[in-house]
Structure formats: structure tokens, C-alpha cells
Image: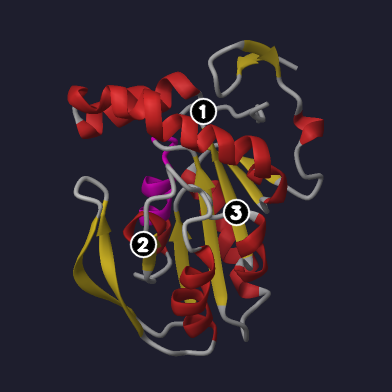
Amino acid sequence: MSAGKDWRGCSLAHRVTDMSMNAQTYSSFEMILNAVRREISVNANSPILIGIDGGGGSGKSTLAKNLAVALGGVPLIHLDDFADWSNDSNWQLSTFSERALKPLLVGITSKHQRYDWLTDTLGEWFEIPSTRIAIVEGVTTLRADLLEYWKISIWVDCTRELRLERAVARDGEAMRAKWIEEWMPGEDQYFGREKPWESASFLFDGSGGESYDFTPPE
């Protein structure tokens, strides 16, 4: 297997055997879209929640947005809209599951206030409509507390360097220190504790490369 880089940017060999034996790996959007559609087709009579996890800047939000559009405009729920997990990764996930996920499973529309990461306050109200299929994306989506909700789960893989580069390009150079000193260390704690890639149905290459060989963080 080819050499690669882990989530801290250190060289190491790929260890595909460390991941879930049930997971399939995909390197293009078309491939993973087809895989998701197959799963939906065999669960035609059930509510389907799709959970997408990965580090900040990995490409999970882009993947989630594209899947939502390709699946006919299904609702897309961002965990970042609910609370700040970077200082406390236990951030009221029980509240999130009770107020957002369980209503979806029983066909109930729910309303929530959007969390503002910069001001640490709750802002505008938004609605999650009743629907059979919905996508949830964000860091900690595949933590053990939430796994029971996902009919389909996806881990988006990307090197630490590229994730940071994307995050700074998106948020501005002034936020680099915030990412390096606070947000990425918060993710590191979650990755080390939960190893969320091991619970994924599918593994997706968020780097945009044509080939994909999964490298689990360690």
C-alpha cells in the first residue's frame, strides 16, 4: 500500500485494515451518490437519516450539500447550527437528538435557534421540515451517542494540512490561530476517543483526488 499522511501531517503507511470491515471507499461524488441511492432504494419504506462526519475543512459540508441537491433537495442539517462542541464535545447531544432527530423519525417538523460561533449566542430561528430523508453533517455526527439514528453514515477523509488550508481560505487568516489552538485540538480529542471512521458505512476522499486509499487518524 502507498505511503500517506495522517491527520497530524506525519508520514505513515495506509492501514485500511484498521477501519470498519463493512465500509466501502469512494473517490468521486458520482460513486458515493450511487451508493447512497442504492441504500435508499433498499430501505424504501423507512425514514432515512444520513450522517456525514469529518474534520473541519475535510469537505463534508460540500459533500452533504451536493448530496442534498442530488437527492431532490432533501433537508440538510448542520450540527454547527446547534452548539459549540470545540470546548466541550459532549455539547448537549442528547438535546439535539431529542429535539431534532427523533421528530424527523416520526414525521414531525421542529424549530430551533441557530448557534453563532463567533458571538457564542443563539440567533435566528430555523425550521427542520418533516421528511423521510434528511442529511446531518458536522464534526461529532458519528459519535457513539448518535449512531443509532443513521441509516447511512459517511466519514470524509482529508489530510490535516489541506483541512487547515481550506479553513483559513474560508474563514480568513485572522482565524488561523483559532483553528490551530482551539478548534482542531477539540476535533483531535473527539477523533482519539471515538474513532468515528470505524463506524462509517462509506469512506469518502474529501481531498478531491482521483484515487483514494483511506488513512485513519491515530
- What residue did someone put label 3 on? 142
**Helix, strand or loop at mark 2:** loop
Q: Which of marks 3 and 1 is nearer the N terminus?
A: 3
The amino acid type, in three-letter code, at marker 3 is: Leu
> Which of the 4 image quadrants contains residue 192?
top right
What span is colored magenta in the figure?
57-66
Along the polypeptide, which appears first: circle 2 or circle 1? 2
Q: In the rendered structure, does residue 61 fall within the stretch colored magenta?
A: yes
Q: Which of 114 and 30 is in front in this view?
A: 114
* Residue 98 against residue 187 in the figure, above or below: below
| Mark-to-mark CA distance, 2 and 1 | 34 Å
Type of amino acid at the residue the image marks with label 1: Glu
Instruction: From this view, report whether residue 146 is shown above or below residue 86.
Output: below
On screen, residue 38 above or below 52: below
The Cα atoms of the two marked residues, 2 and 3, are separated by: 16 Å
Where is mark 1, residue-wise? 210
Badge 2 crowding class, 10 Å Cα cut-off, few under 14, some 14 to 19, many 20 or more, is: many
Residue where numbered disc 2 is placed: 82
